[in-house]
Image (cartoon, rainbow, N blue to C red):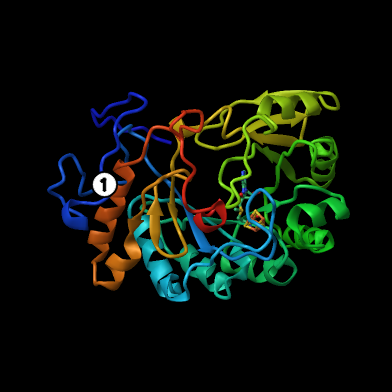
Amino acid sequence: MTAVDLGLPTVLGAAPVRAEGVGGKPSAAVEGVPTSGPLVDRFGRVHRDLRISLTDRCSLRCTYCMPADGVPWLAKDTLLTTDELVRLAAVAVGLGITEVRLTGGEPLLRPDVVDVVARITALRCADGTPPEVSLTTNALRLPVLAAPLAEAGLTRVNVSLDTLRADRFHALTRRDRLDDTLAGIAAADAAGFRPLKLNAVAMRGVNDDELVDLVRFAADRGYEMRFIEQMPLDAGHTWDRRTMVTGPEILEHLAEAFTLTELPGRGSAPAERWLVDGGPATVGVIASVTRSFCGACDRTRLTADGQIRNCLFAREESDLRTAMREGATDEELADRWRIATLGKLPGHGIDDPSFLQPTRPMSAIGG
Ligand code: SAM
Ligand code: SF4
C-alpha cells in the first residue's frame, strides 16, 4: 500500500465521517472530500484491492459462517446484474483498483461467473495492464469451472479446506462433500492456478489437532496452507474470544513439527508467512483478531446487492445500486465510492468494549 499524506488525522479512534453526502447524495460540497484521484481514507491508506461478493448463497453451511438453515437470502431484484457488476468494477479500476477478488457466499454458484471474470480481465488499469482477478471458493464447482475460468483470465484461487477427515468435514460444513472439495482442488491445480492457497479457520476442539496434517497435505502438492483466526462474523453469533485459537497458538502447534522461518515483506497482505523446514513450502497465518493488519489495509468491498463496505466490520454501507439504477453517472458513482472510503475507521475494534458485530453475516459481505 502506498500512503498518501493528506494532512489528515492518524490518531486511532477518530470520529467517522458520514458515508453519504448531504441528503444522501454524493457531494463535492462535503468538506474535505476529494472529487478526483484514487480511493484514499483519512489515514492516508490508498485502496488497490476490491473484493466483490458475487452471491450471498452457498452450497455449504460452515458452522463459523452460517446457521444450518442458511440466512434470509438477498432479494433477487436487489442483486447486481452482470452489466451492473462489471460497470462498478470498471469504476473501481478507474479509481486505481488493480486487484479484484471474487468471493461470496459461494462465487461459483453464480451462473455468469466465467463471463464476469472475462469482462473484468478485459478492463485496463492506468498502466495498461488488466486487473489481477482471483477467487475464494469452497471448490465444489471447480471440476467443471476451473478450465473455463483459467481461459477467461483468472490467475489465482484460494480454497477453503478446514479438515482432511470426511466425518469432520461433514459436521463442520453440514454437507458430506470432502471428496468433491478435494476434486475441486485437484482441478484448480490442473488448470494451473498459482499460487494455490488453502484456507482453514482454526477451531478449538474441532480441527486444531489437524494443523500439521493440513500443512503436510498442502506442502506435498506445492500449495500454501493458511490458518485464519475465527472472527465475529457468523450469522449465528457463536463467536467467543475465549475459545478462539489464536495466531500464536497456531504457530506453537506448527513449531512442534516444523522449523519455521518468518518471511519479511508482508506489505498490505493479511497473512504473515513462514518457510516450512527451510522451504520451498510456506505457511501463512491470518491473525485478524490478535495481530490486526488494519493499519496497512488497502481493501474495499462491493456486496452482491451493490453496497460499498469500507471494512468487513463496517456498520455503514453506501448504496451504489440505487444510485446507478436512478441514473448516476460513472463520475457520480466514483464520487460516492471516494466518500465511502473516507469514512473508513482506523481499525476493526474487536477488542473495544463498544464493538458490535456487523448486521450482515460474512456470507453476505464477502470474505
Ligand atoms: N465460500 C467461499 C469459501 O468458503 O472460500 C468464499 C466465501 S467465505 C465467506 C471466504 C473465507 O472466509 C473462507 O476462507 C472462510 O473460511 C472465511 N470465513 C468465513 N467465516 C469466517 C469467520 N467467522 N472467521 C474467519 N474466517 C471466516
Ligand atoms: Fe459457504 Fe464459504 Fe461460508 Fe462455508 S465459509 S458457508 S463455503 S460462504
Residue 304 placement, left or right of 16: right
Q: Nearer the viewer, residue 66 or 180?
A: 66
* Residue 11 pos. (x, y %): 33, 23
Question: Regarding mark 1 in the picture, which secondary structure is present there?
Answer: loop
What residue lies at 53% left-to-right and 53% top-to-bottom? 361
* Residue 89 pos. (x, y %): 41, 61
Q: Nearer the viewer, residue 160 or 351?
A: 351
Snapshot quadrant of residue 331: bottom left
**Is residue 142 positioned above or below 272 on the image?**
below
**Is residue 287 positioned above or below 303 on the image?**
above
What residue lies at 43% left-to-right and 36% top-to-bottom? 1
Residue 82 placement, left or right of 209: left
Residue 108 placement, left or right of 191: left
What residue lies at 77% left-to-right and 36% top-to-bottom? 281
Q: Nearer the viewer, residue 306 or 174?
A: 174
Q: Does mark 1 have its CB less than 8 Å from ligand 1? A: no
Snapshot quadrant of residue 354: top left
**Is residue 56 positioned above or below 217 on the image?**
below
Identify the residue at the far left of this view: 29
Snapshot quadrant of residue 185: bottom right
Residue 134 placement, left or right of 221: left
**Is residue 203 positioned above or below 63 on the image?**
above
Q: Nearer the viewer, residue 69 or 87?
A: 69
Q: For the image shown, how many numbered marks are present on the structure?
A: 1
What residue lies at 86% left-to-right and 27% top-to-bottom? 257
* Residue 51 pos. (x, y %): 49, 53
- Ligand 2 is found in which quarter of the picture? bottom right
* Residue 13 pos. (x, y %): 35, 27
- Give the residue type that dot 1 points to: Gly
The 10 Å Cα crowd at callout 1, few under 14, some 14 to 19, many 20 or more, is: few
Q: Which residue lies under the disc numbered 1?
A: 37
